Amino acid sequence: MKYSSQMVAKPYFIFALILLAGEILFGISMGIQYLYGDFLFPAIPFNVLRMVHVNLLIVLLLFGFMGATYYLIPEESERELWSPLLAKITFWVFAVAGVLTILGYLFVPYATLAQITFNDLWPTMGREFLEQPTITKIGIVFVVLSYILNVTMTVLKGRKTTISIILLTGLFGLAFFFLFAFYVPDNLVMDKFFWWFVVHLWVEATWELILGALLAFVLIKTTGVDREHIDKWLYLIIAMTLISGLAGTGHHFFYIGTPGYWLWIGSIASAAEPIPFFLMILFAWNMVKNRRIQHNNHAALTWAKGTAVMGFLGAGVWGFLHTLAPVNYYTHGTQLTAAHGHLAFFGAYVMICFTLISYAMPILRGRPHGNGPKAQKVELISFWLMVIGMIGLTLALTVAGVMQIEMQRIPDSVNALSFMDTQTRIATVYTVRLLFGLMVLSGLLTYFYSFFVKEPKVSM
């Protein structure tokens, strides 16, 4: 570890992993409810489980990004973090606010939660992914602004690199587009139109800039490739991300009451959205091929390569499968959407958090060359358990989505099955999905275990 202020990243990484464990547990509980509707009912109904599952995902990724940034920026800027104290305060404020919000979802009826948090003064609640009370959203704004201030001041006072500039661009975009969470038009079409400015322009634009910067940092550290070479790749990837991602918002406007020209804009942009993720595969593997050093942390490099491949599959391939307008007409809102969402979030964003944690945590724990061989072997087992589990889960959801379309969407109104009849007929597929979900959980538990593996003592 070169700079003592990098230690502030450690609690962010640990808390992100704890939140991930909770997120997976709630997801598995939902999978059980698909098969046994009375499971946990009425204590925690499905809509509450889903709300917590999704909100935990967003919060854990923010914690992961913040930890990664606080570790990366001092090294890129070649100076200590501007205010380690501010980073520590930000952590506790965000952690406490996040925990209280989740507890509110679980133990307070949503309507009551809206009332006691004064949602009537500034209504922002009730929107998917943005269910947080208004006061929590305001808290998120202050947390993100203090985080960006800390990072920006560090960069301004130190060395400026392509990685840090692209990372900052992504962070400023993240903060700006979240402000649309506070704008809730009365018109439902307008509401959905601007709602996607948060959801889409986070995950398919600004977060991709953050992903590219974090991936480039780890590849530099583990391969020793020249920055000039990596910078050229980054500029190309980011250009394609912004061009396709911004226009790609249109594929969410197909059938919500917006003008028909969005069918063309959304479809054409969607066809281009897999390109930056494919470039990330070429980027990662090209860096490994041209490596100048043999870094001992093989696990971190495996996570980096896995991020590029799984991000392309989840966000690129599975995204493209159902975003062209004529196809989306039948697929929207089916389990194909869930298949894409699960593999994209895990492959692109959860895995980049694992990549940074796998690289940085050994160093933060006094192991500059990475964990020992035994611990890395356990970590690689966890990698494959999670990756295979998520691929299996995605394939199961894909099959379920195709069956939904075949039985419910394509037939005429006379021969089409009802929603519940369709769900009954694909219950076996949901069982397979649940089993693969348990495999992902076992992979995460194995990853936790890798932190405590003791290496055999070498006799002198």
Image (spheres, rainbow, N blue to C red):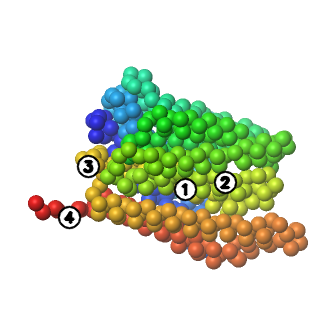
Q: Residue at x 45, y 66 (%)?
A: 385
Badge 1: how crowded within 10 Å, few (<14), some, or many (20+)?
many
Q: Name the N-terminal-most of marks 2 and 4.
A: 2
Q: Name the N-terminal-most of marks 1 and 4.
A: 1
Picture quadrant of residue 180? top right
Q: Name the N-terminal-most of marks 4 and 3.
A: 3
Residue type (three-letter) at the residue carrying disc 1: Met
- Left or right, residue 265 beside residue 222: right
Task: Say above or below: 7 vs 50.
Answer: above
- Contact between marks 2 and 4 (CB within 8 A): the answer is no
Q: Foreground residue, 5 or 379?
A: 379
Residue type (three-letter) at the residue carrying disc 2: Gly
Q: Residue at x 43, y 55 (%)?
A: 302
Q: Name the N-terminal-most of marks 3 and 1.
A: 1
Q: Residue at x 33, y 60 (%)?
A: 376
Q: Position of residue 115 (x, y in %)?
A: 59, 44
Q: Nearer the viewer, mark 2 or mark 1?
A: 1
Q: Foreground residue, 30 or 319?
A: 319
State the SS at label 2: helix
Task: State the separation of the CA atoms marked 1 and 4.
Answer: 34 Å
Question: Can you tell which mark lies on residue 367?
Answer: 3
Question: Can you tell which mark lies on residue 456?
Answer: 4
Q: Name the N-terminal-most of marks 3 and 2.
A: 2
Q: Which residue is mark 2?
A: 319
Q: Which residue is mark 1?
A: 310
Task: State the separation of the CA atoms marked 2 and 1.
Answer: 12 Å
Q: Name the N-terminal-most of marks 2 and 1.
A: 1
Quarter of the image that includes the N terminus: top left
Badge 4: how crowded within 10 Å, few (<14), some, or many (20+)?
few
Camera sees residue 355 = yes
